[in-house]
Protein backbone atom coordinates (compact mmCIF):
# COMPACT_ATOMS: atom_id res chain seq x y z
CA UNK A 1 0.00 0.00 0.00
CA UNK A 2 0.96 3.65 -0.30
CA UNK A 3 3.59 4.70 2.20
CA UNK A 4 4.73 1.33 3.46
CA UNK A 5 6.49 -1.89 2.47
CA UNK A 6 5.10 -5.44 2.67
CA UNK A 7 3.14 -6.65 5.69
CA UNK A 8 2.25 -10.06 7.11
CA UNK A 9 -1.09 -10.19 8.94
CA UNK A 10 -2.13 -12.74 11.57
CA UNK A 11 -5.68 -12.91 12.89
CA UNK A 12 -7.97 -15.22 14.90
CA UNK A 13 -9.81 -17.90 12.95
CA UNK A 14 -12.90 -17.50 15.12
CA UNK A 15 -15.34 -14.75 14.16
CA UNK A 16 -18.11 -15.65 16.61
CA UNK A 17 -16.96 -13.03 19.14
CA UNK A 18 -17.18 -10.13 16.73
CA UNK A 19 -14.32 -7.93 15.60
CA UNK A 20 -10.85 -7.45 17.09
CA UNK A 21 -8.53 -4.53 17.70
CA UNK A 22 -5.52 -4.10 15.42
CA UNK A 23 -1.80 -3.93 16.15
CA UNK A 24 0.99 -2.73 13.84
CA UNK A 25 4.48 -4.03 14.71
CA UNK A 26 7.68 -2.45 13.38
CA UNK A 27 11.21 -3.94 13.48
CA UNK A 28 14.39 -2.17 14.50
CA UNK A 29 17.30 -0.46 12.77
CA UNK A 30 18.84 -2.63 10.01
CA UNK A 31 16.41 -5.37 11.03
CA UNK A 32 13.80 -7.35 9.19
CA UNK A 33 10.14 -8.26 9.53
CA UNK A 34 11.16 -11.89 10.13
CA UNK A 35 12.70 -10.89 13.46
CA UNK A 36 9.31 -9.69 14.71
CA UNK A 37 7.25 -12.63 13.54
CA UNK A 38 7.29 -14.05 17.08
CA UNK A 39 4.66 -11.42 17.85
CA UNK A 40 2.34 -12.20 14.97
CA UNK A 41 0.61 -15.47 15.78
CA UNK A 42 1.21 -15.21 19.52
CA UNK A 43 -0.54 -11.87 19.98
CA UNK A 44 -3.20 -12.64 17.36
CA UNK A 45 -4.10 -15.80 19.27
CA UNK A 46 -5.21 -13.58 22.16
CA UNK A 47 -7.75 -11.75 20.02
CA UNK A 48 -6.01 -9.17 17.84
CA UNK A 49 -5.40 -8.52 14.15
CA UNK A 50 -1.61 -8.17 14.01
CA UNK A 51 0.20 -6.57 11.06
CA UNK A 52 3.98 -7.08 11.11
CA UNK A 53 5.74 -4.73 8.71
CA UNK A 54 8.95 -4.65 6.70
CA UNK A 55 10.36 -1.13 6.80
CA UNK A 56 10.68 0.93 3.63
CA UNK A 57 14.41 1.12 4.29
CA UNK A 58 16.72 -0.61 6.76
CA UNK A 59 18.03 2.77 7.95
CA UNK A 60 14.66 4.48 8.49
CA UNK A 61 14.61 6.70 11.56
CA UNK A 62 11.87 6.31 14.21
CA UNK A 63 9.66 9.09 12.84
CA UNK A 64 9.74 7.40 9.43
CA UNK A 65 8.65 4.13 11.02
CA UNK A 66 5.80 6.00 12.70
CA UNK A 67 4.78 7.33 9.27
CA UNK A 68 4.70 3.76 7.96
CA UNK A 69 2.63 2.53 10.89
CA UNK A 70 0.10 5.26 10.24
CA UNK A 71 0.00 4.37 6.54
CA UNK A 72 -0.71 0.73 7.39
CA UNK A 73 -3.52 1.69 9.76
CA UNK A 74 -5.07 3.96 7.11
CA UNK A 75 -4.82 1.27 4.44
CA UNK A 76 -6.29 -1.54 6.53
CA UNK A 77 -8.99 0.71 7.99
CA UNK A 78 -10.04 1.73 4.50
CA UNK A 79 -10.61 -0.37 1.43
CA UNK A 80 -7.18 -1.99 1.40
CA UNK A 81 -7.75 -4.80 3.87
CA UNK A 82 -8.09 -8.36 2.51
CA UNK A 83 -11.61 -9.69 3.02
CA UNK A 84 -10.64 -11.97 5.93
CA UNK A 85 -8.98 -9.04 7.71
CA UNK A 86 -11.82 -6.60 7.03
CA UNK A 87 -14.27 -9.14 8.45
CA UNK A 88 -12.34 -9.30 11.74
CA UNK A 89 -10.85 -5.84 12.25
CA UNK A 90 -12.41 -3.12 14.37
CA UNK A 91 -10.80 -0.16 12.65
CA UNK A 92 -11.64 2.14 15.58
CA UNK A 93 -9.26 0.27 17.95
CA UNK A 94 -5.56 0.16 17.18
CA UNK A 95 -2.25 -0.19 18.96
CA UNK A 96 1.32 0.28 17.74
CA UNK A 97 4.41 -1.61 18.85
CA UNK A 98 8.01 -2.02 17.83
CA UNK A 99 11.52 -2.99 18.78
CA UNK A 100 14.53 -0.66 19.02
CA UNK A 101 14.00 2.15 16.46
CA UNK A 102 10.66 0.49 15.76
CA UNK A 103 9.80 0.99 19.43
CA UNK A 104 10.86 4.63 19.16
CA UNK A 105 8.63 4.86 16.10
CA UNK A 106 5.69 3.39 18.02
CA UNK A 107 6.13 6.02 20.73
CA UNK A 108 6.34 8.70 18.02
CA UNK A 109 3.11 7.37 16.49
CA UNK A 110 1.47 7.59 19.90
CA UNK A 111 1.92 11.37 20.13
CA UNK A 112 0.28 12.09 16.77
CA UNK A 113 -3.26 12.46 18.10
CA UNK A 114 -4.73 9.55 16.14
CA UNK A 115 -7.90 8.82 18.15
CA UNK A 116 -7.93 5.22 16.95
CA UNK A 117 -4.62 4.45 18.70
CA UNK A 118 -5.47 3.06 22.13
CA UNK A 119 -2.09 1.75 23.30
CA UNK A 120 1.64 1.92 22.58
CA UNK A 121 4.30 -0.72 23.27
CA UNK A 122 8.05 -0.16 22.92
CA UNK A 123 10.44 -3.09 23.25
CA UNK A 124 13.91 -1.70 24.07
CA UNK A 125 12.99 1.52 22.25
CA UNK A 126 15.62 3.79 20.71
CA UNK A 127 14.97 7.43 19.90
CA UNK A 128 16.20 10.97 20.52
CA UNK A 129 12.80 12.24 21.66
CA UNK A 130 10.86 12.66 24.89
CA UNK A 131 7.16 12.07 25.33
CA UNK A 132 5.65 14.70 27.58
CA UNK A 133 2.78 15.16 25.11
CA UNK A 134 1.93 11.44 24.91
CA UNK A 135 -1.67 10.79 25.96
CA UNK A 136 -1.88 7.12 24.96
CA UNK A 137 -1.24 4.38 27.56
CA UNK A 138 2.36 3.25 27.02
CA UNK A 139 4.22 0.08 27.97
CA UNK A 140 8.02 0.36 27.75
CA UNK A 141 10.18 -2.76 28.09
CA UNK A 142 13.86 -2.25 28.81
CA UNK A 143 16.65 -4.81 29.15
CA UNK A 144 19.16 -4.87 31.98
CA UNK A 145 22.19 -5.60 29.75
CA UNK A 146 21.20 -3.46 26.76
CA UNK A 147 24.27 -1.64 25.42
CA UNK A 148 22.62 -0.42 22.20
CA UNK A 149 19.64 1.39 23.74
CA UNK A 150 20.66 1.36 27.42
CA UNK A 151 17.69 1.63 29.73
CA UNK A 152 19.30 4.49 31.63
CA UNK A 153 19.46 6.69 28.53
CA UNK A 154 16.43 5.44 26.58
CA UNK A 155 13.65 3.37 28.16
CA UNK A 156 13.77 4.96 31.62
CA UNK A 157 13.91 8.61 30.42
CA UNK A 158 11.09 7.85 27.96
CA UNK A 159 9.02 6.47 30.82
CA UNK A 160 9.81 9.41 33.08
CA UNK A 161 8.92 11.93 30.37
CA UNK A 162 5.34 10.62 30.09
CA UNK A 163 3.15 12.72 32.37
CA UNK A 164 -0.28 12.66 30.71
CA UNK A 165 -1.01 8.95 30.24
CA UNK A 166 -1.04 5.63 32.04
CA UNK A 167 2.41 4.11 31.78
CA UNK A 168 4.30 0.95 32.70
CA UNK A 169 8.00 0.23 32.73
CA UNK A 170 9.36 -3.32 32.81
CA UNK A 171 13.09 -4.07 32.84
CA UNK A 172 14.04 -7.63 31.93
CA UNK A 173 16.74 -9.16 34.10
CA UNK A 174 19.89 -10.41 32.39
CA UNK A 175 18.64 -9.67 28.85
CA UNK A 176 20.29 -7.62 26.11
CA UNK A 177 18.99 -5.41 23.32
CA UNK A 178 18.07 -8.33 21.08
CA UNK A 179 15.47 -9.75 23.44
CA UNK A 180 12.93 -7.69 21.47
CA UNK A 181 13.62 -9.78 18.37
CA UNK A 182 12.59 -13.02 20.07
CA UNK A 183 9.79 -14.25 22.27
CA UNK A 184 10.58 -13.59 25.91
CA UNK A 185 7.79 -14.93 28.10
CA UNK A 186 7.67 -11.98 30.50
CA UNK A 187 7.86 -9.44 27.67
CA UNK A 188 5.08 -11.02 25.61
CA UNK A 189 2.85 -11.66 28.63
CA UNK A 190 3.05 -8.02 29.70
CA UNK A 191 2.48 -6.88 26.12
CA UNK A 192 -0.64 -9.00 25.73
CA UNK A 193 -1.99 -7.88 29.11
CA UNK A 194 -1.37 -4.21 28.19
CA UNK A 195 -3.15 -4.59 24.86
CA UNK A 196 -6.09 -6.46 26.39
CA UNK A 197 -6.39 -3.78 29.07
CA UNK A 198 -6.29 -0.73 26.84
CA UNK A 199 -7.37 -1.86 23.37
CA UNK A 200 -10.12 -4.17 24.66
CA UNK A 201 -10.75 -2.18 27.87
CA UNK A 202 -10.71 -5.47 29.78
CA UNK A 203 -9.98 -4.61 33.43
CA UNK A 204 -9.48 -8.28 34.31
CA UNK A 205 -5.94 -7.86 32.99
CA UNK A 206 -5.00 -5.32 35.68
CA UNK A 207 -4.01 -8.23 37.91
CA UNK A 208 -1.28 -9.23 35.44
CA UNK A 209 0.17 -5.72 35.22
CA UNK A 210 0.63 -4.97 38.90
CA UNK A 211 2.58 -8.00 40.18
CA UNK A 212 4.19 -8.20 43.58
CA UNK A 213 7.95 -7.44 43.84
CA UNK A 214 10.27 -10.29 42.99
CA UNK A 215 8.66 -11.47 39.76
CA UNK A 216 10.93 -13.99 38.02
CA UNK A 217 12.93 -12.59 35.10
CA UNK A 218 12.29 -8.95 35.99
CA UNK A 219 14.89 -6.52 37.33
CA UNK A 220 12.53 -3.59 37.88
CA UNK A 221 8.91 -2.54 37.50
CA UNK A 222 7.52 0.99 37.62
CA UNK A 223 3.93 1.83 36.81
CA UNK A 224 0.88 3.94 37.38
CA UNK A 225 -0.88 0.57 37.84
CA UNK A 226 -3.76 0.75 35.31
CA UNK A 227 -6.62 0.23 37.73
CA UNK A 228 -8.69 3.23 36.65
CA UNK A 229 -9.80 4.69 33.37
CA UNK A 230 -10.95 3.14 30.11
Image: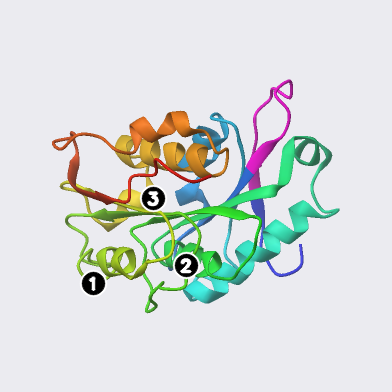
**Reading the chain from its start, which is encountered first: label 2 or label 3?**
2
Label 3 packing within 10 angstroms: few (<14), some (14-19), many (20+): many
Magenta segment includes 11: yes
Residue 134: numbered disc: 2
Percent from the top left, x then y, of residue 13? 68, 25
Q: Main secondary structure of the magenta part?
A: loop
- SS state under label 3: helix
How was the colour assigned to the protein in this rendering?
rainbow
Instruction: Look at mark 3 in the image and give the residue it sits on.
Output: 181
Residue at the right extreme, as displayed: 79
- SS state under label 1: loop
Percent from the top left, x then y, of residue 171? 23, 51
**Which residue is rendered at x = 32% and y = 63% of the image?**
159
Q: Is residue 158 above or below residue 210?
A: below
Any part of residue 9 in sight: yes
User: Which quarter of the figure has residue 192?
Assistant: top left
Instruction: Look at mark 1 in the image and give the residue it sits on.
Output: 153
Percent from the top left, x then y, of residue 119? 52, 52
Please state which of the two labelled residues, at mark 1 or mark 3, is closer to the viewer.
Answer: 1
**Which residue is rendered at x = 38% and y = 75% of the image?**
130
Q: Nearer the viewer, residue 99 or 106?
A: 106
Q: CA distance from mark 1 to mark 2?
A: 19 Å
Q: CA distance from mark 2 to mark 3?
A: 25 Å
Q: Which residues are magenta?
A: 8-21
Percent from the top left, x then y, of residue 2? 76, 68
Callout 1 touching callout 3 (CB < 8 Å): no
**Reading the chain from its start, which is encountered first: label 1 or label 3?**
1
Q: Is residue 40 above or below residue 12?
A: below
Q: Is residue 144 above or below residue 15?
A: below
- SS state under label 2: loop
Amino acid sequence: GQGYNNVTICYPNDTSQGTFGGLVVMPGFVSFKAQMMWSCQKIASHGFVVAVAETNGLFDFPFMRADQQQAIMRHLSGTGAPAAVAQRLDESRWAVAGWSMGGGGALDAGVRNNPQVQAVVGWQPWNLSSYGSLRVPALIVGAQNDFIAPSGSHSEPFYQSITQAEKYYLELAGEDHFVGSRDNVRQSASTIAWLKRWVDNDTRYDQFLCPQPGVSGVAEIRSTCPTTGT
